[in-house]
C-alpha cells in the first residue's frame, strides 16, 4: 500500500521544469506588426531620397518618418484593442500597424510635396523691400517715368517711386475686370484692357474713353501710340483717340497674350497661345516680320537688346535670340519653377515671378539661364515690372505692391 501511494503521488506531482517554461513577450506582436507594416510600405512607397534645403543640409522625407511613427502607433493601438477584446491576436495588431503606416506615409508625402514646392536646393535670397497695401484684387502692373500703375478690381492705383511708393491718384474706379495696363512713357497716358474693350485715360485727370470693343488681353505703349491685343489681332491706336472702332493691325491666328515694345529696333514683340511673333509698324498699321513656335502659352514677355524671355506657365521660361527678327532662334529653357507667371530683365539678370514660390533670380549673361537664387520672402509673386533702378512685384498673398533694388 505504501508503494502504491507513492506512485500515485508521483503521478500528481507537476513536472519539475514547469516553473521554467518560456513565455512569449507581450511586445512581440507589436514588433512583428511593425516589421510587417514596414514591409508593406516598402512595397508601395518609392525609394526615399534625401532632400536638400537651402542651407545645404540633408532632410529625411517626412513620408518615411510619418510612416514609421504611424506603423508603431497603429501596432500599439491594435495590441491595446486585442487585450481589451481578449481575442484577435497578431492579425489585428499587424493590420492596425500596416494601416497606421500607410496613413502616415500619405500624410508625410503631402508635407514633402509642400517642401519641394518651397525648396529647390537653391541659395536663399533676401533682398530688402518696401511695400504698400493695395485695395481690391490687383491683376496687373506697369512702371515708367517714376510712376507705377497697379490695375485690379477697383480700377487703377498710381504710385510715385519718390518717398517710398507714395500714393498719387486713383483712376478708372468704375471700370471692372481690368486685366492689363500700360503707361505711356513721357506722356503718361494710361491704356487699360478689359473684357469690355480698350480704354484710354489722359494723364493725371479726366474721364476715360472706350476706343475698341472686345476682349483686350494685352497692351504696350510708346509715348504717342498704344498697341493692344484683341482676340487674335494686334492693333494700333493713337493716344487721344475718341472714337470706338476697329483699328489698323494684323491677325496672328491665335489669342494674343502679351506685348512688349523694343524701342531700340522699332519692333513690337507679341506672344500667343503658340507663337512668339516680331512685328513692325508700317504706316498706320502693323506688319509681321517673323516668328517662332513656343512650347506653351506665352503668358508674359520681357526684352533686352537682342534677347527675349517668355514666361510659359508650367513649361517654365524660354529664351530667344531676336538679332534676326525674321527668324528668332531658341537659346535656352528653364523649368525649375512650378509655374512661371511673369518675367522681367534687369541688366544681365532675369527675374521670374513664380507665384507661391516667390521670385527666382537668373543669370543670362552668356545666353543661358542659370539660377542664382530664390527670394521666397516676396510673397505670391504674380506680376513684375521694372524701371531699371527698381523692380516691382505684385504680391497676391498680402495684397501688396513690393519694391526692391534691381541690383540688390
Image (cartoon, rainbow, N blue to C red):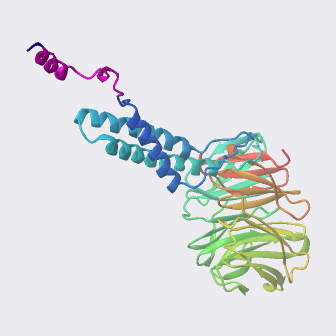
Q: Nearer the viewer, residue 177 or 388?
A: 388
Query: Which of the 4 quarters of the picture holds residue 128?
Result: top right
Give the farthest residue toward the top.
Answer: 2
Could you tell me residue 59's position as x and y percent?
65, 41
Magenta highlight on residue 209 = no
Quadrant holding the N terminus: top left
Q: Is residue 328 visible?
A: yes
Magenta stretch: helix, strand or loop mostly: helix
Could you tell me residue 153's position as x and y percent?
55, 58
Could you tell me residue 56's position as x and y percent?
75, 41
Does residue 399 appear to the left or right of 363 in the view shown? left
Name the residue: 68% across, 43% down: 377
Q: Is residue 194 above or below residue 151?
A: below
Could you tell me residue 398's position as x and y percent?
59, 45
The stretch of residues the image draws in magenta is: 3-22
Name the residue: 82% across, 49% down: 406
Q: Nearer the viewer, residue 147 or 294?
A: 294
Q: Is residue 104 visible?
A: no
Query: Which of the 4 quarters of the picture holds residue 336?
Result: bottom right
Query: Which of the 4 quarters of the picture holds residue 125?
Result: top right
Amino acid at each position: 500500500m505504501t508503494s502504491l501511494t507513492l506512485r500515485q503521488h508521483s503521478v500528481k506531482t507537476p513536472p519539475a521544469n514547469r516553473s521554467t517554461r518560456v513565455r512569449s513577450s507581450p511586445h512581440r506582436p507589436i514588433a512583428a506588426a511593425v516589421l510587417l507594416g514596414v514591409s508593406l510600405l516598402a512595397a508601395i512607397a518609392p525609394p526615399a531620397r534625401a532632400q536638400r534645403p537651402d542651407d545645404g543640409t540633408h532632410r529625411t522625407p517626412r513620408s518615411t518618418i510619418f510612416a514609421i511613427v504611424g506603423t508603431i502607433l497603429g501596432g500599439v493601438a491594435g495590441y491595446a484593442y486585442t487585450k481589451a477584446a481578449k481575442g484577435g491576436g497578431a492579425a489585428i495588431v499587424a493590420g492596425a500597424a500596416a494601416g497606421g503606416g500607410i496613413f502616415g506615409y500619405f500624410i508625410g508625402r503631402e508635407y514633402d510635396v509642400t517642401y519641394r514646392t518651397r525648396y529647390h536646393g537653391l541659395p536663399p535670397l533676401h533682398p530688402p523691400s518696401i511695400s504698400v497695401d493695395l485695395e481690391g484684387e490687383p491683376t496687373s502692373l506697369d512702371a515708367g517715368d517714376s510712376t507705377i500703375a497697379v490695375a485690379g478690381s477697383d480700377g487703377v492705383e498710381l504710385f510715385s517711386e519718390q518717398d517710398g511708393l507714395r500714393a498719387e491718384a486713383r483712376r478708372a474706379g468704375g471700370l471692372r475686370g481690368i486685366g492689363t495696363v500700360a503707361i505711356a512713357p513721357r506722356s503718361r497716358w494710361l491704356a487699360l484692357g478689359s473684357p469690355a474693350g480698350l480704354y484710354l485715360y489722359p494723364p493725371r485727370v479726366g474721364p476715360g474713353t472706350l476706343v475698341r470693343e472686345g476682349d483686350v488681353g494685352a497692351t504696350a505703349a510708346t509715348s504717342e501710340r498704344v498697341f493692344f491685343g484683341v482676340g487674335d489681332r494686334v492693333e494700333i491706336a493713337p493716344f487721344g483717340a475718341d472714337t470706338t472702332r476697329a483699328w489698323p493691325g494684323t491677325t496672328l491666328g491665335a489669342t494674343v497674350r502679351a506685348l512688349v515694345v523694343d524701342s531700340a529696333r522699332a519692333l513690337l514683340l507679341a506672344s500667343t497661345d503658340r507663337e512668339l511673333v516680331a512685328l513692325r509698324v508700317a504706316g498706320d498699321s502693323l506688319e509681321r516680320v517673323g516668328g517662332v513656335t513656343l512650347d506653351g502659352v506665352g503668358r508674359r514677355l520681357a526684352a533686352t537688346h537682342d534677347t527675349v524671355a517668355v514666361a510659359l506657365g508650367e513649361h517654365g521660361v524660354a529664351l530667344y535670340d531676336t538679332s534676326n527678327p525674321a527668324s528668332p532662334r531658341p537659346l535656352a529653357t528653364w523649368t525649375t519653377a512650378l509655374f512661371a507667371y511673369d518675367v522681367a530683365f534687369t541688366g544681365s539678370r532675369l527675374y521670374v515671378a513664380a507665384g507661391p514660390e516667390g521670385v527666382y533670380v537668373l543669370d543670362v549673361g552668356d545666353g543661358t539661364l542659370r539660377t542664382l537664387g530664390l527670394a521666397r520672402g516676396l510673397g505670391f509673386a504674380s506680376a513684375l515690372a521694372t524701371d531699371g533702378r527698381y523692380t516691382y512685384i505684385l504680391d497676391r498673398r498680402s495684397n501688396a505692391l513690393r519694391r526692391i533694388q534691381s541690383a540688390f
